[in-house]
């Protein structure tokens, strides 16, 4: 914190001397009081025009509880609400009221996936206006912020440098890796996290092997730096301190008055059909037959391969290629476009079948009549079920849990499947609408994983800052490399970068690569090494990053399946996992 205050003051004083116009632009920020006024008006308009449905009644209860809890003393809170229960705006109502009641400085919303962050940020911009929302994440399109006519700078872009703004929307990667960073540019925002309300959305996605340093840092922010933490999810993880997890959080207070009652109220939305034998897989062919018989359905599978194989089998059965595929082989910009198309088709009540990996779960606002989910972690099954009859418009939605031919990826996903199988063996069909079952699930899951697997706490205790920063990564990517694909605007951005480099115009490659992050796809390093040898990859900025060559892009990037490995006339998705 001391390092952060010193670094930020140095940056700002230097800027004020050399670039006074830029320094002046930083002052254009909204006030929390004005933001509360806008949110109150938006919620009043929304609830006044909302039809009287059970889901809208539940959302009203959640909002009331959030507003009443805002008067409590700062600290650590949990917000346990069923999927579709209005957490996005209700948690914001709590945060703004809580900040104003206790003189806190800002609200920081931390979201695990870019597929959710742009959706939620749009909700906030619709309420507060573009200028009030500062997004800081890899998928941010900085070109959406036109330069200010007077200063040449936009406040939102500048505020992302040090988070000096009333509302920050960021990713788990950006937030937590900054807490354990050591470089000045990454650390300068830390002192502005103090005395903030921090909403951790979909908190169950925190990596199990980093739980010890994460919960220690959260506890420190709350108890030593005046922050309030909100653990928000439908599937609350077991982060509280206990005998088997003494590092856990203490004095966690629930915001809603009666979480079990909320879950009971939403249990009529869906019926879950569990597999008769949780160890007996269904063949892909048989699963494709079942999906082909559905007019509209979402099927969530374990792996990219699974999604591609199942989509192709459906093509054969249906005689067309209208089944939508979603996986991380598709770059983020492309995925967002696909998700918008799915949402539009659903709203128009047209038939649509989607085969996806887990990236469509946990917060993506889709509403299918039928959802198929490969048996995995109980939290994942519940999150997939949250995409079924989300608004309660049907008498009953249907969730079909099946045992896939494939296994989940190694590590926590595979351990989570094992825990779910154990619960099914001991209890029979599980009630995903019982919020207490997730505490049991996560306690068993965490017992299988060292919460400080990388010995980060020891390095922190001995002030080995470089070691901590090198080891703390929210996403393990030792075996993968991000490749830029010239999809959409990416080709123009790449051409502009190379033109400026060629004629000697100074550029910030860090800034430019951030613009291109939403056009990257992770592939195995053994594949990228081979592609470099064949000339399929070209360097960008003195080999700081690599991009797909335009000629190879035409063959290797499929408009349905994203980036695949291509040899001769055959697609070989099995080489990408």
Image: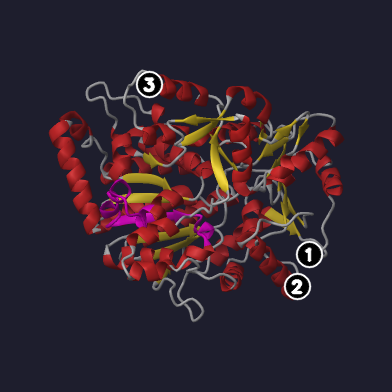
Q: Residue at x 69, y 56 (%)?
A: 408
Q: CA distance from mark 3 to mark 2?
A: 62 Å
Q: Position of residue 33 (x, y in %)?
A: 26, 45
Q: Are marks 2 and 1 in contact (CB under 8 Å)?
A: yes
Q: Which residue is mark 1?
A: 278
Q: Position of residue 238 (x, y in %)?
A: 52, 69
Q: Are marks 3 and 2 in contact (CB under 8 Å)?
A: no
Q: Position of residue 129 (x, y in %)?
A: 36, 34
Secondary structure beneath disc 3? Answer: helix
Q: Earlier in the sequence, mark 2 or mark 1?
A: 1
Q: Which residue is mark 3?
A: 500
- In which quarter of the view is residue 69 placed? bottom left
Q: Residue at x 47, y 30 (%)?
A: 540
Q: For residue 47, which numbered disc appears in the image?
A: none
- How many residues crowd mark 2 within 10 Å: few (<14), some (14–19), many (20+)? few
- In which quarter of the view is residue 552 placed? top right
The stretch of residues the image draws in magenta is 178-207
**Residue projecting furthest to the front:** 533
- How many residues crowd mark 3 within 10 Å: few (<14), some (14–19), many (20+)? few
Taking the magenta stretch, the answer to whether it contains residue 192 is yes
Single out the mark in the foreground, 1 or 3. Answer: 3
């Amino acid at each position: 914190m001391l390092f952060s205050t010193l670094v930020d003051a140095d940056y700002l004083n230097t800027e004020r001397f050399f670039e006074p116009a830029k320094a002046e632009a930083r002052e254009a920020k909204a006030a929390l009081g004005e933001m509360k006024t806008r949110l109150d008006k938006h919620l009043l308009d929304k609830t006044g025009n909302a039809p009287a449905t059970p889901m809208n009644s539940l959302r009203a209860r959640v909002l009331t509880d959030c507003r009443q809890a805002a008067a409590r003393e700062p600290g650590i809170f949990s917000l346990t609400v069923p999927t579709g229960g209005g957490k996005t705006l209700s948690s914001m109502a709590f945060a703004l009221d809580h900040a104003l009641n206790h003189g806190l400085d800002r609200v920081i919303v931390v979201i695990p996936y870019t597929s959710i962050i742009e959706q939620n940020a749009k909700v906030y911009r619709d309420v507060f206006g573009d200028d009030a929302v500062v997004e800081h994440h890899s998928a941010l399109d900085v070109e959406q912020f036109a330069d200010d006519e007077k200063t040449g700078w936009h406040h939102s872009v500048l505020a992302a440098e040090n988070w000096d703004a009333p509302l920050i929307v960021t990713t788990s990667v950006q937030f937590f890796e900054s807490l354990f960073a050591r470089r000045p540019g990454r650390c300068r925002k830390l002192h502005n996290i103090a005395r903030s309300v921090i909403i951790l959305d979909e908190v169950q996605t925190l990596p199990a092997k980093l739980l010890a340093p994460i919960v220690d840092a959260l506890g420190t922010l709350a108890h030593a730096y005046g922050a309030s933490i909100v653990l928000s999810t439908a599937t609350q993880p077991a982060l509280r301190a206990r005998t088997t997890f003494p590092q856990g959080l203490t004095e966690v207070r629930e915001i809603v008055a009666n979480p079990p009652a909320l879950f009971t109220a939403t249990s009529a939305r869906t019926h879950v059909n569990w597999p008769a034998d949780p160890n007996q897989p269904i063949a892909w062919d048989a699963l494709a037959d079942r999906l082909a018989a559905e007019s509209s359905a979402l099927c969530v599978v374990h792996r990219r391969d699974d999604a591609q194989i199942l989509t192709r089998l459906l093509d054969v059965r249906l005689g067309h290629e209208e089944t939508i595929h979603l996986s991380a082989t598709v770059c983020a910009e492309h995925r967002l476009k696909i998700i918008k198309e799915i949402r539009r088709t659903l709203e128009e009540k047209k038939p649509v079948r989607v085969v996806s990996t887990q990236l469509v779960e946990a917060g993506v606002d889709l509403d299918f009549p039928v959802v198929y989910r490969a048996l995995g972690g109980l939290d994942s099954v519940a999150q997939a079920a949250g995409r079924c009859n989300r608004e309660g418009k049907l008498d009953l939605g249907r969730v079909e849990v099946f045992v896939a031919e494939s296994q989940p990826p190694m590590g926590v996903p595979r351990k989570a499947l094992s825990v779910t199988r154990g619960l099914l063996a001991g209890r029979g069909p599980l009630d995903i609408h019982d919020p207490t079952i997730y505490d049991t699930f996560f306690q068993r899951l965490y017992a299988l994983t060292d919460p400080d697997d990388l010995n980060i706490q020891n390095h922190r205790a001995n002030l080995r800052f470089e070691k901590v920063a090198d080891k703390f990564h929210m996403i393990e990517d030792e075996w993968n490399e991000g490749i830029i694909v010239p999809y959409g605007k990416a080709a123009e951005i790449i051409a502009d970068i190379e033109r400026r480099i060629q004629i000697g115009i100074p550029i910030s490659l860090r800034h430019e690569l951030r613009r291109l992050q939403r056009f990257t796809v992770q592939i195995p390093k053994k594949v990228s090494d081979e592609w470099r040898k064949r000339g399929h990859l070209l360097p960008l900025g003195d080999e700081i990053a690599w991009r797909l060559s335009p000629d190879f892009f035409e063959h290797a990037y499929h408009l349905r399946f994203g980036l695949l490995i291509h040899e001769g006339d055959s697609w070989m998705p099995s080489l990408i996992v």
